[in-house]
C-alpha cells in the first residue's frame, strides 16, 4: 500500500511539473562575446551579470561581464568587462565557475587556480567596479550562493562551507 501511494504521489508530482512548464527559446547565441559562459545572474530582461572562461588556446583566464542594455538583436550592446582572473604563469583556471549577486551592486564569484589547487572567493560592493579577494582555500571552489548580504554558501569537491557575516 505504501508503494502504491508513493507511486501515485510521484506520478502526481511529475504531472504537475509538466503542467507548469514554459516554452523556452534562444534569446541570443551570445555570438562574439565569449565562447564559454558558465553562470548567469539575471536582474531584468535587459540587465544581468554573466561569467565563464576565455576559452582561447593559451589563455586560461576567467571573466565576469555586466550587461545593462541587452537586446537579442545586438548581442554586443551594453556588455562591460568587470573582472578577469590573473594571467601570470603560475595561474591556470577553469574560469569563473559561479557568481551570486544579492543586488545589482553586491555580489560574489569563485574561481580556482588549477596549478596551485587554490580556490578563491572574490566580492564586489559597487557593481563590479572593484573586486576584492575575500577568501581562499586549498582544494578549489566550484559553486557559490548567497541569499542576502551575510548568509552564503560555497562548495568544493569535499565540503560545503557557510558564512553568516
Image: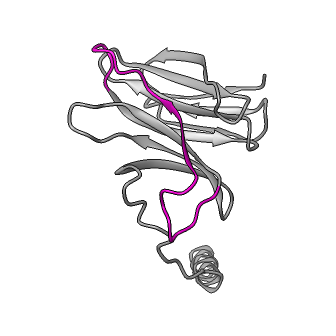
Residue 130 higher or lower than 136, as above or below:
below
Q: Which of 119 and 103 is in front in this view?
A: 103
Percent x, y of residue 137: 49, 16
Percent x, y of residue 85: 44, 26
Color scheme of the displayed model = one colour
Rendered residue at 37%/55% (across/down): 32
Going by the image, does 50 lie left or right of 130? Answer: left
Provide the residue span drawn in magenta: 69-92
Residue 40 higher or lower than 152, as above or below:
below
Instruction: Identify the image quadrant of the C terminus.
Output: top right
Q: Nearer the viewer, residue 1 or 109?
A: 109
Q: Is residue 83 magenta?
A: yes
- Quarter of the figure with residue 10: bottom right
Q: Nearer the viewer, residue 129 or 122?
A: 129
- Quarter of the figure with residue 2: bottom right
Going by the image, does 35 lie left or right of 8? Answer: left
Rendered residue at 30%/42% (across/down): 55
Instruction: Identify the image quadrant of the N terminus.
Output: bottom right
Going by the image, does 14 lie left or right of 36? Answer: right
Q: Is residue 24 magenta?
A: no
Rendered residue at 43%/31% (across/down): 157
Residue 46 higher or lower than 10, as above or below:
above
Magenta region, main secondary structure: loop
Rendered residue at 55%/51% (across/down): 40
| Tag count | 0
Amino acid at each position: 500500500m505504501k508503494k502504491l501511494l508513493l507511486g501515485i504521489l510521484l506520478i502526481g508530482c511529475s504531472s504537475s511539473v509538466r503542467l507548469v512548464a514554459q516554452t523556452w527559446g534562444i534569446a541570443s547565441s551570445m555570438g562574439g562575446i565569449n565562447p564559454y559562459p558558465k553562470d548567469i545572474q539575471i536582474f531584468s530582461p535587459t540587465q544581468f551579470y554573466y561569467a565563464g572562461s576565455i576559452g582561447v588556446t593559451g589563455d586560461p583566464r576567467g571573466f565576469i561581464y555586466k550587461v545593462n542594455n541587452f537586446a537579442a538583436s545586438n548581442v554586443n550592446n551594453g556588455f562591460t568587462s568587470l573582472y578577469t582572473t590573473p594571467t601570470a604563469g603560475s595561474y591556470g583556471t577553469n574560469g569563473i565557475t559561479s557568481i551570486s549577486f544579492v543586488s545589482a551592486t553586491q555580489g560574489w564569484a569563485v574561481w580556482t587556480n588549477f596549478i596551485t589547487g587554490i580556490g578563491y572567493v572574490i566580492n564586489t560592493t559597487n557593481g563590479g567596479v572593484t573586486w576584492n579577494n575575500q577568501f581562499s582555500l586549498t582544494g578549489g571552489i566550484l559553486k557559490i550562493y548567497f541569499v542576502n548580504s551575510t548568509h552564503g554558501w560555497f562548495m568544493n569537491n569535499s565540503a560545503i562551507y557557510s558564512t553568516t557575516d
